[in-house]
Image (tube, rainbow, N blue to C red):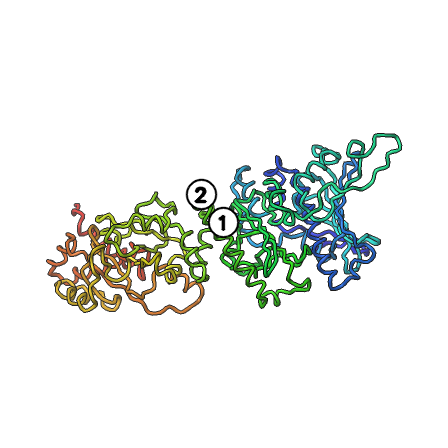
Amino acid sequence: MSDTQSETQSETLNCQTEAKQLLQLMIHSLYSNREIFLRELISNASDAIDKLRFRSIEDASLLGDDAEFRIDISFDKDAGTMTIADNGIGMSRDEVIAHLGTIAKSGTAEFLANLTGDQKSDSQLIGQFGVGFYSAFMVAKEVEVLTQSAAGGDGVRWRSTGEDAYSLDAVEDLPRGTQVILHLQEDALEYAEDARLRHIVTRYSDHIGVPVRMFSTPGYGAPEDEEFVPELEAVNSAQALWTRSRSEVEDEEYKEFYKHVSHDFEDPLSWSHNRVEGKFEYTSLIYLPKRAPFDLYNRELPKGLKLYVQRVFIMDDADQFLPLYLRFVKGVIDSNDLPLNVSREILQQDERVTSIRNAVTKRVLSMLEDMAKKEPEQYQAFWDEFGEVLKEGAGEDFANRAAISKLLRFASTAGDGKNKNVSLEDYLKRKKDDQESIYYICAETFETASRSPHLEIFKDKGVEVLLMFDRIDEWLMSSLTESEGVPFVDVMRGDVALPGEAKPEEDQEDEDAEEHPLVERIQAVIGDKVEGVRPSKRLTGSPACLALSDYGVGVQMRKILEASGQSMPESKPFFEFNAAHPLLHRLDTEVDEDRFAELVELLFDQASLAEGGTLQDPATYVERMNRLLMDLLPATD
């Protein structure tokens, strides 16, 4: 991996392949937005200071004689350089390699696989992935990082031109913290100008809770005379944004703070800033993103809010303050009651945390409900990105299940194609007067669901059916049994009753089935492949279908269980046939039992395919189809 150059720990190492690809993409795709590099570097410096502030609570010696935190920006236009320096936690040699030589972020491969080559489109993808340190190369032809860990050891110099490799050198007598020195490109020398840098700092980083300092210059509060001596002065307000009153904070400030805490490129979809006083005192500032990150469906990765106690940073990804199904929410919790030495273990057992968690969860769900009512198009955009994750809550959060149910959206036979824009409230308003159930169907795709033979009688009668084709839907419906007191009914299960009809008793179903002469003949052919054979009340155009028993496992759930390595319970469907269909009339008159069996097996396989299942013996199915086609085609000489 490395090529040692000297005995002084100087070496050249190769960059991670994904890092090189992402770097080149950012340089080209984000060219018009490249001033955000300074926001990202200042955010990194602020994070480093927050981490040291927290570590110093237990070990004050880490601060030494330098306890006044700051971020300093300087530039040299003649040399074409600018520098961002902090006195935060710093990095050791191993940490430099880990943080600057690789992209230790889940979803990198998937991110790169989704790139299209279109600059505008790929720029949006970068926003979902985050930019961070690598944004420096949008303006720099070379980047140099000098860093000294607060824990001691040798200082480190990291140097790279953003190509295939970077160099590492040991350096002595560095101050604690990190200095990022940018050797600017010829067309980026504007970032070695006082006015330009001040504008960027006040626009993007005014909310940073430590002073971002620059040397004073004539025209910025300093007298314009010959004896002017530049001094370092804070450019930003240096007040944590969430500690300010909502009336004092502009929307643009909220948006920039979101980009700071999330490292997202885009503006947030919505936010809520709230201070709670009473038994427990805390401030929350929570954001809903516009787009889902690539690692959204990995439930094992760190996620959560930034936790502060009395404005002191405690930890990133404090997942105790929100349930897992709201893992997409970003923001800050600042508590006045928790101890400064709080740990993740303590958080899991603290009643104050439970109280905050319950309140913040309700606030997020309330934000979504308000958005759904007042800004339905914006909510639809949210649902398209995060709907599947929110569905997890209906099965995991019983206390808030009713609130979550109001937020669910589905496609429907009465809806607009595959768009998931039908709420349960919409469905209940439209249902027939004598309809006592909410009908739905689960399938692997919209096409499979919308064209299922199980829908035929419902379409003929004008009864709306919800079309569910997210991978989580069958699991969801195992937990969601009713809405507003109206039960859910799966149209693929049992002998479904239409509005105004009573579902027949089981012994009555058996009696009705035995009356048709085809039942016994078909049962003799397919035997133990099915639970039973019966005439269908749901088919009007198709010859046959497979119906699940009331407790049978559907295609979606079966695949989820198989993928997780769980053993599958025995679950056989019912074979239902449409007694009025011409094919069944033909079967009823077939005297050749071999040919009868051949046709029944074909109908069974077709019914399996129609519900999205797979054939156990595709080759035999093809052979049967070919024999049937040969029988139908006229003979040729």
x then y, percent, for residue 84: 74, 44
Q: Amino acid at mark 1?
A: Met
Q: Residue at x 39, y 50 (%)?
A: 409
User: Is residue 617 shown above or below 127?
Assistant: below
Q: Residue at x 64, y 51 (%)?
A: 16
Q: In the displayed orientation, state which residue is furthest to the right.
A: 227
Residue 367: image tag: 1
Q: In the displayed orientation, state which residue is furthest to the front.
A: 278
For label 2, the SS is: helix
For label 1, the SS is: helix
User: Is residue 529 shown above or below 313?
Assistant: below
Name the residue nearer the viewer: 416 or 560. 416
Q: Earlier in the sequence, mark 1 or mark 2?
A: 1
Name the residue nearer the viewer: 17 or 132. 132
Q: Which residue in the protein does label 2 denote?
A: 374
Q: Amino acid at mark 2?
A: Lys
Horizontally, residue 287 falls left or right of residue 468, namely right
Horizontally, residue 129 falls left or right of residue 152, namely left
Number of residue marks: 2
Q: Is residue 328 visible?
A: yes
Number of residues whose C-alpha sits closer than 10 Å to that of mark 2, classed few (under 14), some (14–19) or many (20 or more): few
Task: Determine the CA span between mark 1 and mark 2.
Answer: 11 Å
